[in-house]
Image: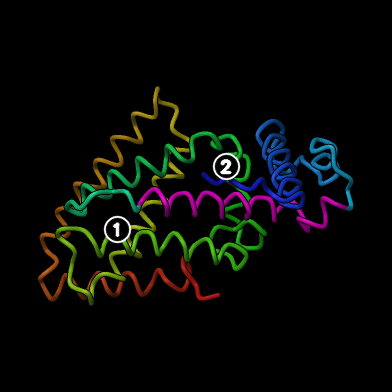
Amino acid sequence: MTSKRPPAKGEQARHRILDAALRLFAAQGFEKTTMRQIAGEANSSLGLTYRYFKNKEDLVIALYALLAADYARLAQGIPPAPMAQRFSIAMGLKLKLLEPHRDVLSSVFMSALQPRSGVFVFGEPSGDVRDVVLGTWRLLVATATDAPDAALQDDVVMGLFMVQLAIIFYWLHDPSPDHSLTTQLTALAAGALEMALSLGTMPQFQQQVHTLAALMRPVFAPKT
């Protein structure tokens, strides 16, 4: 039996700095947190902190990347099923994954929606993360038992990507116990998806979906 190799010192330091930053973002907000405070919280020198992260926006992108990778791994375990059902399961997994970081994500919410921000969810710095998430949805769509025609799949993926983001933003502001309103919204979205798929063979509907996806891509999933 082989033992798992412990993380290298550099990797340990990087994780320690990231964990410290996330604690501070959650406690006092993204805007109010400084790199000097992060270094102090991590018991690290400011120079070493900057060696791993050039600014605090880099720390948020690192969180995005970790969450996207974990989501891709979890989604691989979703069993074959109709797409609406897989969508519901995938959203449940996504929100469960995000739950421990809800305060952090809330603290960066306004910055994440600012096009000039380094943590803009549709910006160039988060391009690799978007590619991972889009790839995850592409797999979920392509392997559904009722997957649409290949020509329509990328358009459906674009739509689900946007619906996912809308539900996450709603969830961040959901005041209901156990986020029951978000659960209802997810169920509503799954029902709408099921209805839409029933129209998927109609040429006029396919054209509308294609046009909508083409309008969304340059803004919400630009090539980086």
At horizontal 54% and vertical 36% (from top left) the residue drawn is 102
User: x and y percent of residue 186 in the render?
Assistant: 30, 42
Magenta-drawn stretch contains 56: yes
User: x and y percent of residue 108 in the render?
Assistant: 62, 45
SS at mark 1?
Answer: helix
Amino acid type, residue under disc 1 in the picture: Leu
By secondary structure, the bulk of the magenta-drawn segment is best described as: helix
Q: Which quadrant would residue 41 be assigned to in this image? A: top right
Question: Relative to 79, is 71 on the left or the right?
Answer: right
- Say which residue label 2 marks: 105
| Quarter of the figure with the C terminus | bottom right
Amino acid type, residue under disc 2 in the picture: Leu
- Say which residue label 1 marks: 140
Q: What span is in magenta?
A: 48-75
Extreme residue in the top direction:
177
- Sequence-wise, the earlier of marks 1 and 2 is 2
SS at mark 2?
Answer: helix
Q: Which quadrant would residue 140 be assigned to in this image? A: bottom left
Which of discs 1 and 2 lies nearer the camera? The answer is 1
User: x and y percent of residue 149 in the render?
Assistant: 17, 72
At horizontal 72% and vertical 35% (from top left) the residue drawn is 24
Query: Is 75 rendered above or below residue 170?
Result: below
Disc 1 residue crowd, few under 14, some 14–19, many 20+, Cα 10 Å: many
Protein image colouring: rainbow
Magenta-drawn stretch contains 94: no
Question: Relative to 196, is 142 on the left or the right?
Answer: right
